[in-house]
Amino acid sequence: MLYGRSTELAALDELTAGAREGRSGALVLRGEAGIGKTALLDRAAQSASASGMRVLRVTGVEPEADLAFGGLVQLLWPVQDRLDGLPGPQADALRAVLGATRPPTRDRFLTGLAVLTLLADLAEQGPLLCLVDDAQWLDQATSDALLFAARRLAAEQVAMVFATRDEGFAAPGLTELRPSRLDTGDAVSLLADLGLPPALRDQVIAESAGNPLALIEFGAARRDDPGSFTPVTVADRVLSSYRTQIAALPEKTRLALLFAAAEGRGDLPLQMKAARTLGVGLEDLEDAERAGLIQVTESTVVFRHPLIGTAAYQGAVLARRIAVHQALADAADDPDCRARHLPLATTSPDDEVACELVAAAERAADRSAYAAASLLHQQAARLTPDRRAQVRRLTDAATCALNAGHAGQARDLAEQAERSSPEPEDLARLAPVRAAVMFESGERREAARLLLRTHAAGPGLGPAILRTGATYGWFAGDADSVREAAERLASLGEADPMVEGMAHLVDDDYARGLPLLERAVAAGQDGSDAARTRALHSAILLGDDAAAMELAAAEVARCRAQGLIGALPQALHLLAERQVLAGAHRDAEASVAEAVEIARDTGLRERVAWLGGVPARIAAIEGDERRCRDLVRDVPDVGRVAGESALSLLELARGDYEAALGRLETAAGPGPQRHMAMAMATVADQVEAAVRLGQSGRAERPMRAFEAWARAGRQPWALAVAHRCRALVDGREEDYREAVRLHGQGRRPFERARTALLYGEWLRRARRRSEARDTLRSALEDFEGLRAVPWAERARAELRAAGDATTSAKATAENVLDRLTPQELQVVRLAADGNSSREIAAQLFLSRRTVEHHLYKAYPKLGVGSRRELARLNLV
């Protein structure tokens, strides 16, 4: 019986009941050792099995905390026959985890997606309960995969429960429950069941401090030896109690328990194979089994509580532990298992052992278990006698730490390697890691300069380091770094049109720079992934909306097809920015919503904040001031231009021209970023604000730069905006007319509407009211289509002033798609295109049931009842 756990049992019952009814969920039980977490999991498993639910269970073990996917292997081994039903990349990822194949896994989050799909598929046959005990000891690769799956559960009939100590296993986003210590009444009831005399109960209750495991262990100890006493803290008391019990066992039994504790996975055949080399056999476990310290089957040994294993291991002298780990390493058939024990059996440098650890690290990295790979490289470095080889292994450890998302650890390892070797070649290998960490932490100029210095010291490093240095320099506003990188690439015979083009842009030489970017766009259309990425960024710099939209959509599709979950938020971000420019606000919001959800689920917190710039721009256009300011508040410094642009647009719409102009002048600043963000997004705002203030000279310089950029790039929308700006300053009608004509070839409806509004105002002031009304109606139609409320109000006011009495404010006709959530919109569009639920699930990194759940909710909102009816709707 469980005492004092009514709240926890009710929460577990609610979770499993929800799964049986089709509502997935996850719960974290967090608390100190012995608080009763395992007992709660046992009760949940019993109740679930009795109701017909399938139960999968895994227990983290401390010796395996650094073994790549050790926990996931334990969890999925019984269901590996289901892998063939998964999408190809996901099946390959799990086969690599289970050791069936070793194909490189390109994305460290793909395994989590595969786990989600597998759990959802298993739940097709009935509700599923997944229990994870001692989650604080799971290896990080397993933790990442299970947490990704847990956060994306929705309607799969899957319940997940994680039990963990207070320390370790951060699980933001999941509901947590902390089992409390037992009160006196429950403690008395528990001790009465143990048969402890009333005279001893108060002493045991005081010593145990309400910890259930301590109550049981101390109660049993007092019952058998009323005079016993143990150390002060509860944890130490429990461990001391177990050490006392173990110390009373025969020597060979203690050694057999040490083998079980050191091996950690409960693999009885391996333990006995290793133990025989030290004269220990199966019969030596009997006394420990009779004492209730372990449970033994024909293939496993399990400690009754993990603290018993801790006591068995910590209570052994170092020489014994080393001998046991060496025996286990020698007995292991699995090279990864052998690699886990070797560093614990080696006390001095040994290059042979170090090489085995490097091989294990490479296998872990191939399966995207970068945290485990980093630790293995660190262990290899510790055991490497040659200093130069040690530095190389520390560098590899730093690289893997960076790939695992541990920038701070990567920095520490890189600094440790740098202190160990002054050799230029070693420093050159370290530079990309150090620079990446510096860039992520905001030291962008320093990151660019480091890469350029490194290349100068070792020109054999190749062009990639120069391309990265140019990119860092561009975002840092460091024109010299961009120029230097371009010159060095050219001197190597590796001239890169994108880098060379950026180098000309920083010198304001648009006539030479933009044609080079056009070459980069053309070269990347059918090139490598890297070439297509350069083409996409070149198209953005050019303002080539058609190419940028096509390339961004292709990059999103590639990430979906290859399961590149970690890269998808950035690809969706770039696509969303293009969608806003095209006036597809709902599509952009759907892209951002998906990107935010994935970024949260994968721990990319900086990307979550950065993504706020896109909906902030939409909110500014639509006049939603509160939402815009809330979103901009969280945008990090690297996205400052996008945030300031959104706020200035709000101020411009409500006529606060001084605030808008001042904000834009401050945000622009020096450096090459202005060519990409400011010239393309905000120069027109600067010009309009300056003209409204009667201070057009304040916008003359950025306007001239924009005109030069527009002429060199020849993009119709950009030329149209340039003519509009010139018309505002000079008041010439031919510029307005040319702007209107060019907008007919462009793709930016908001800019088109603004041009029509300004031209209509000019026509009205020129007393050409009939022409003004036609132009202003065109502007109003575009603004209403974009839900640009403040701008539509301006257009209506101008129409009234021009004599149009039919322009009173009217409700914009509801778009049926506005009834859908962003994810429902994505799902119904894919379904309308003929994709099956499984195909949609694979593209959106969801489960099939979640897809069907979204369709079920979307149908009544759209007034349809089937996919066939859905296909007839206009979902654009």
Image (cartoon, rainbow, N blue to C red):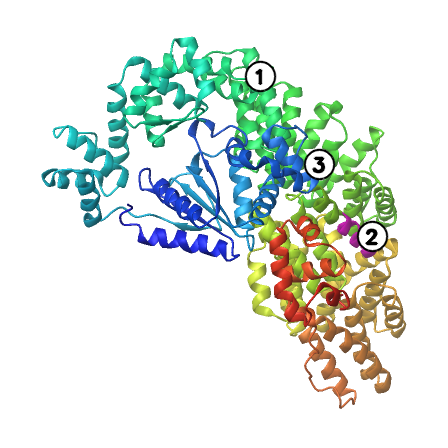
Task: Answer above or below: position of 712 versus 790.
Answer: above
N-terminal of the two: label 3 or label 2?
3
The answer to if 259 sits in the magenta stretch is no
Numbered circle sitting on residue 205: none
Q: Nearer the viewer, residue 214 or 462?
A: 214
CB under 8 Å between callouts 1 and 2? no
User: Could you tell whether 833 is left or right of 248 in the image?
Assistant: right
> What is the magenta range?
543-554
Mark 1, secondary structure of its residue: helix
- Residue beneath disc 1: 356
Could you give the CA–CA distance between mark 1 and mark 2, rounded to whole angstroms?
A: 48 Å
Rendered image quadrant of residue 133: top left
- Work out which quarter of the rendered image holds the N terminus and state it: top left
Question: Label 1: how many residues lie within 10 Å, few (<14), some (14-19) or many (20+)?
Answer: some
Mark 2, secondary structure of its residue: helix
- Residue beneath disc 3: 469
Task: Answer above or below: position of 820 versus 256.
Answer: below
Rendered image quadrant of residue 499: top right
Q: Amino acid at mark 3?
A: Gly
- Work out which quarter of the rendered image holds the C terminus and state it: bottom right
Q: Nearer the viewer, residue 763 or 235?
A: 235
Instruction: Tell me the residue at 27%/46% (across/down).
Output: 181
- Residue 41 location (% of width, % of height): 39, 43
Nearer mark to the viewer, of 1 and 2: 1
Task: Answer above or below: position of 696 versus 480.
Answer: below
Numbered circle sitting on residue 547: 2
- Residue 22 location (% of width, % of height): 53, 56
N-terminal of the two: label 1 or label 2?
1
Q: Amino acid at mark 1?
A: Glu
Mark 3, secondary structure of its residue: helix
User: Could you tell whether 591 is left or right of 722 in the image?
Assistant: left
Q: Amino acid at mark 2?
A: Ala
